[in-house]
Image (cartoon, rainbow, N blue to C red):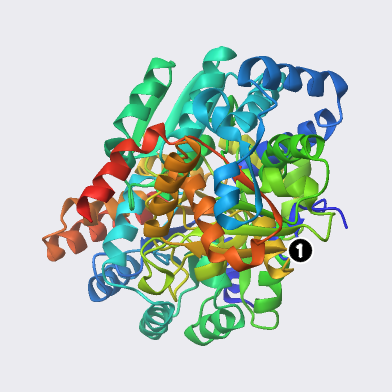
Amino acid sequence: MNKIDTFFNKLKAANRTAFIPFISIGDPDIEASFEIAKTLINNGADMIELGFPFSDPMADGKVIQKSYERALKNIISMQDAFDFIKRLKAYRDIPVIFFTYYNPVFVLGHKFANGARNAGVDGVLIVDLPPEESDEFTKYIKKKDIYQIFLLAPTTDIDRMRYILSYAKGFVYYVSVTGVTGARETLSAAIRSKVKEIKKISDIPVGIGFGISTKEQVKEISEYADAVIIGSKIIQFIENNINDKSRILKEIAEFSFNIRSSLS
Amino acid sequence: MKLPDNMGHFGAYGGRYISETLMPAIIELEEFYKKIRKDNSFKKEFNYYLKNYVGRPSPLFYAKRLSDIYKSEIYLKREDLNHTGAHKINNTIGQALLAVKMGKKRIIAETGAGQHGVATATVCALFDLECEIFMGKKDVERQEQNVFRMELLGAHVNPVESGSQTLKDAMNEALRDWIANVKNTYYMIGTVAGPHPYPQIVRDFQSVIGKEILKQIKKLPDIMIACVGGGSNAMGMFYPFIKYDKVKMYGVEAGGLGIKTGMHAASISGGRPGVLHGNKTYLLQDEFGRIKNAHSIAAGLDYPGVGPEHSHFADKKRIIFDSVTDEEAVSAFQMLCKLEGIIPALESAHAIAYLEKIKREIKGKSVIINLSGRGDKDMHTVSDYILSK
């Protein structure tokens, strides 16, 4: 059984909503990002989403773009990313979602899938790989016990929702804004009803991400969703304190702890 | 087999690699376009503007002095004589009509040198559409005049400061804008690339180039040559001739400082397959699948990818891809000025430069070159280049 399934089953039994933070591997450098990941885990992260820095992050807002640019200065290879994940898994065995654009995966093909499996990746979220084009990747991860995590957006209508949910495994990622990644102050009122629609079609867990940054938002989401994903807000702490690593860790620890405490 | 297939694939290439947020808009566009491309009143309207606004058909000019030098029969398809000075307007007229029919009031577009931006701003003025152009900050600085031109036409130009601050980053930013404003916005892609159905839409609208040539010639040419950045002028000329097996086709990519230096924009000659900006195609990339910056003296060729249909025909060897350097392109640019009294765009000068590479092969044969644009925009670039030598 995939670790993501075991994990959500456990949460469900405990009636708990998962906190999934997102960071980029290698921002501001490999060791510091490893310390950040550990800090998140020690302060309430239930699962972690790790971004592989890409040159052309078309679905990302300014904060994650800059994070990737910082990381790319360290020339992070796919092997570096796999080593990072392996070490992290040895530190604490929580589910790891690998976030990437398709090209770095495509150029490696089967090698990517083998490396990801050895590193302990449980799910791969490829933001520019919709189900229509996913056959090729499905072949790579076949028999590897890795899930492709699919996304639903506010623009996805009910028919398409059914179509995507027929592919979805582990959990489905609901993009809470019509836009790119990045913290927003308010939460669209439509999310609750969208999640309700999803739940009518499938009993797969639903994670909410894009634009989430505050305790209040998180509290509300925990009333109807199974996981909350926060990226830009956390990465902003890195950008704000780029020359002070201990401060980065301190602020991220506090934020993470507060978010976890706001979730049921 | 008809290309693309109904999933937008050209053999192993093309497709739709985009965020879920955009998928419904892309499917809406595909379904709308499927209906309208066969609609006679739409075709009529498109042809009306091509004739009365763009000034089509563009002449197929027999270049006598050039022909004498190469001992062959060389014709130039004069897309440089179109309104706004290049073939780009054929596509923007078509897509603007499409946007109007779809009820979209806001147009976004990416541009490199500014040619597609100007062509987009032009049709937005013509059809009373709001126009947002995304242009890399470096290109904004290099192409001041085109920025001013777009602003005169009523467009708002957004300088893009992320990444390499050039065309690929402008396209990233246009996609980000589209993700946020997808409900009321039409994304006007300028070349035969991007997610399905864009490569097909742009090819269809640009095909007017090749279709006119078919009417203008008495017999099929032996050879056709076009420059290839994204590849819209080339596909526009080649596509109606693809079925004529004996017509040989050359796609000339931008070799920049030379393929071996890594400083070029030749995605097929010097790249390998990958996925970017919504399609699978040949790309310039590093070993980790990150996209490399392209280099060419011709800003319109300065893109690290190419249309997926070109990738397909490259693998099938139906179109032969090769490259010429900045230096060879500038020489050809100067040659055409002096021999024919025509100042070509630096992009088109790449196609002219290729004559020299195949001078043995073309002896006694007929050749059609797509002169895709005029060179007024390149005065500074060329004079700087010549002075630096």
* The image quarter in which residue B208 lies: top right
Q: Residue furthest left?
A: A244
Q: Amino acid at mark 1?
A: Gly
* Residue denoted by label 1: B11
Q: Nearer the viewer, residue B111 or A30?
A: B111
* Circle 1 chain: B
* Label 1 crowd (10 A; few <14 / some 14-19 / many >=20): some
* The image quarter in which residue B258 lies: bottom left
Residue under the image location 68 percent in, 27 percent down: B94
Residue under the image location 44 percent in, 62 percent down: B255
Quick one: SS at disc 1? Answer: loop
Query: With B379 as the anchor, is A78 left or right in this view?
Result: right
Query: With B298 as the anchor, is B239 left or right in this view?
Result: right
Residue under the image location 33 percent in, 41 percent down: B139
- Against B344, residue B223 (above or below) is below
Query: With A112 as the anchor, is B215 left or right in this view?
Result: right
Q: How far from the left and from the top, in percent, is residue B42? A: 79, 21
In this rendering, does residue A34 appear at all? yes
Query: With B347 as the anchor, is A83 left or right in this view?
Result: left
Q: Nearer the viewer, residue B27 or A157?
A: B27
- Against B381, residue B314 (above or below) is below
* The image quarter in which residue A113 lies: bottom right
Q: Nearer the viewer, residue B165 or A94?
A: B165
In this rendering, does residue A264 appear at all? no
Q: Nearer the viewer, residue B123 or A70?
A: B123
Number of numbered discs: 1
Q: How far from the left and from the top, in percent, is residue A236? A: 27, 50
Quarter of the figure with the N terminus of chain A: bottom right
Q: How far from the left and from the top, in percent, is residue B32? A: 77, 31
Q: How far from the left and from the top, in percent, is residue A132? A: 73, 56
